[in-house]
Amino acid sequence: MESELNLLEKEVDALCPLIEGQDGFFRLIVEEVTDAVVLTDERADILYVNPVTEKLLGYRPEEMLGRNIRMLMPVKEQGQHDKYVKDYAETGQAHIIGIGRDVMCRKKSGDLTPFELRISETFVRGSRYFIGTLRDISRRKEAEKKAREATFKAIRANKAKSDFLANMSHELRTPLNAIIGYSEMLQQQLFGDIGHEKYLDYARYIHISGNRLLNLVNDVLDLSKVEAGRYELVKAYADMETIIENIRYEFLPMAKAAGVRLVMICPEKIGEVFVDEKALKQILANLISNAIKFSHADRDVEVTFTPLDRRHISITVRDEGIGMSPEEMEVALSSFGQVQSSHVRSHQGTGLGLPLTRSLVELHGGEFFLESEPGKGTIVRVSLPIRDENQKLL
């Protein structure tokens, strides 16, 4: 009798090596883990469950032992599982063994709860057994759901904001243009002497402030149109040398006021280009104004125009100013982002120039590159197509 008991104990040890170790060590591990552990035979009939299974699924161990694992599955998946077990027994091709996946388990209450399932396979004395672990991931799934909802709300809110601003073009620009126009009339005293000299000063301040505000509104609206996918390029032929000269004269006063030398370099004639002239001027204006604004006095701001081939041009704007770190560059390129360093914040700016410039470049089918280093300056390189793709080159 004693020898039969010893033999039985050896068979149990061999059958369940993770449960019945010589010193109970493996049983302690299995019964103390916070995941449900289920041992089944090759038919998927349950041979063992650890104590935490009752806490997670609601079944007492005796309610599960001897029953098929399909009892934990949603009804619509039970037939598929039976087919999988049969096919695996016949072909040996595994689809879920050794691979973690998320499943829905049916608790005793009938509720379906998300679990992460991992299945491993073992052989003892020629018989196949499966060990499954179930980890409750309901909190993780709830967090993922909330994150998805928050992301969706943020995207929807951002789109609503972009659509709203894009639709505000007429409502914002019309009164601003009126303010600028009337201030010009006052400065020119078109209808007679305005009187006191202070009134002329005030008219000039109104005109300057109105133009500054109009430029800001234009940048906001243009960037919002780009984000909303409503910015449309209007391409036509324009003379590149004329554009360069006009931009130079426009920014010479700003460079002089900042004590910066504005150097325009165009080693060879470019001629006619097929672009959205307004957008191209805005690209150049944003890059040059930034370079002047953040440059040190008595330094050069170089703007170089170099033909790359018959259809593309490279524009490089280089300054020797305060520069930016990689983290600051990332912020500067984000929509409505403003670098927070004291050196940058000491200069006026909206944080719209670089992201809008990059967007306009990309709308043209071009490429935008930014290099910068604190204390050493910034280099922006833009590659733009300047010929109509259908135009035949001689």
Image: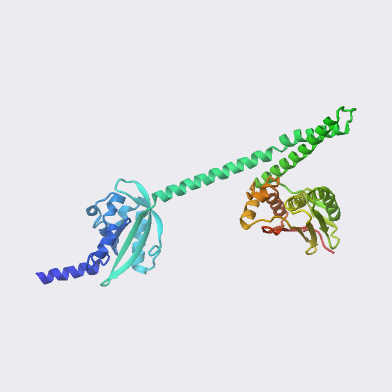
Q: Quadrant of residue 211?
A: top right
Query: Is any part of residue 45 visible from this angle?
Result: no
Residue 351 at x, y = what percent? 67, 47
Furthest residue in direction right, as rendered: 192
Which of the pair 195/42 is nearer the observer?
Answer: 195
Residue 104 in the image: x percent, y percent? 38, 52
Residue 93, compared with residue 301, is above or below; it is below
Left or right: residue 283 versus residue 11 is right
Q: Is residue 108 left or right of residue 163?
A: left
Q: Quadrant of residue 2?
A: bottom left
Picture coordinates of residue 83, whole percent (x, y)? 36, 60
Query: For the view shown, which residue lies furthest in the left direction?
Result: 1
Tell me, yes or no, if residue 10 can be seen here. yes
As rendered, which of 51 and 347 lies closer to the eye? 347
Number of numbered discs on residues: 0
Could you tell me residue 276's position as x and y percent?
78, 50
Indicate the quadrant containing the N terminus: top left, top right, bottom left or bottom right: bottom left
**85 vs 192: above or below:** below
Return the residue found at the far front: 298
Display colour scheme? rainbow
Residue positioned 78% across, 48% down in the render: 278
Indicate whether 197 appears above or below 320: above
The quadrant of the rendering that contains the C terminus is bottom right
Q: Is residue 370 left or right of residue 139?
A: right
Which of the two residues, 191 or 144, is positioned nearer the viewer here? 191
